[in-house]
Amino acid sequence: MKDNLQLGDAEFGKMMLVLKQPVTQANHKEFKFLDGSEVGEMQEIASGIWAMPAYMQPDDDFTMFFLTTQIESGETVMAFATGETADGNFRLSQPLVTGAGLNLLNEHQPNRAKRVLKFLNDISKADEGNWRMVE
């Protein structure tokens, strides 16, 4: 693995942010991107699965959502999903590893990707999550 991984690096796409605590009704308001002013707050979309827009603009078909869920190991991770509309119905894509989602967002909206990365790094710096390399 190379030192100093950067947003956009292929290896960065293998990075996953693992949260120390799951998102719940009691703490979901603590996860506000851009103070919740532009994108809102985490919403539970299924049991134990929370989502919040990371990028969504009325004049752009590309959308990206934060997605928190528990994985097989029992850990809660911050992943991403794109939004898709098919036959008039909106749905989220299959989850993307944190780094892969950030790299995809970086391809479409580099400035927003940097803001999202700062938000996630702030979670890590607050000791609420840790970055890990996944296979």
Image (cartoon, rainbow, N blue to C red):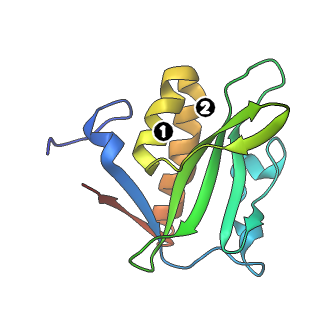
Q: Earlier in the sequence, mark 2 or mark 1?
A: 1
Q: Quadrant of the C terminus?
A: bottom left
**Residue 90 x/y as whole percent:** 79, 40
Q: Is residue 27 above or below residue 61?
A: below
Q: Characterize the local packing of mark 2: few (<14), some (14-19) or many (20 or more) Cα atoms within 10 angstroms.
A: some
**Residue 51 x/y as whole percent:** 70, 56
Say left or right for 3 vs 112.
left
Mark 2 is on which residue type? Arg
Quadrant hosting residue 3: top left
Q: Residue at x 48, y 47 (%)?
A: 96
Which residue is label 2 attached to? Answer: 112
Label 1 secondary element: helix
Considering depth in this image, is 116 or 65 the residue closer to the camera? 65
Considering depth in this image, is 88 or 11 the residue closer to the camera? 88
Label 2 secondary element: helix
Front: mark 2 or 1: 1
Label disc, if present, on residue 56 of the rendered structure: none
Q: Quadrant of the N terminus?
A: top left
Q: CA distance from mark 2 to mark 1?
A: 9 Å
Q: Residue at x 49, y 22 (%)?
A: 107
Say left or right for 27 vs 104.
right
**Residue 23 x/y as whole percent:** 65, 73
Tally the marks: 2
Confirm or deny contact between disc 2 and disc 1 (CB under 8 A): no
Q: Residue at x 54, y 34 (%)?
A: 113
Considering depth in this image, is 73 or 77 the residue closer to the camera? 73
**Residue 37 x/y as whole percent:** 84, 46
Residue placed furthest toward the left: 1
Mark 1 is on which residue type? Leu
Label disc, if present, on residue 102 of the rendered structure: 1
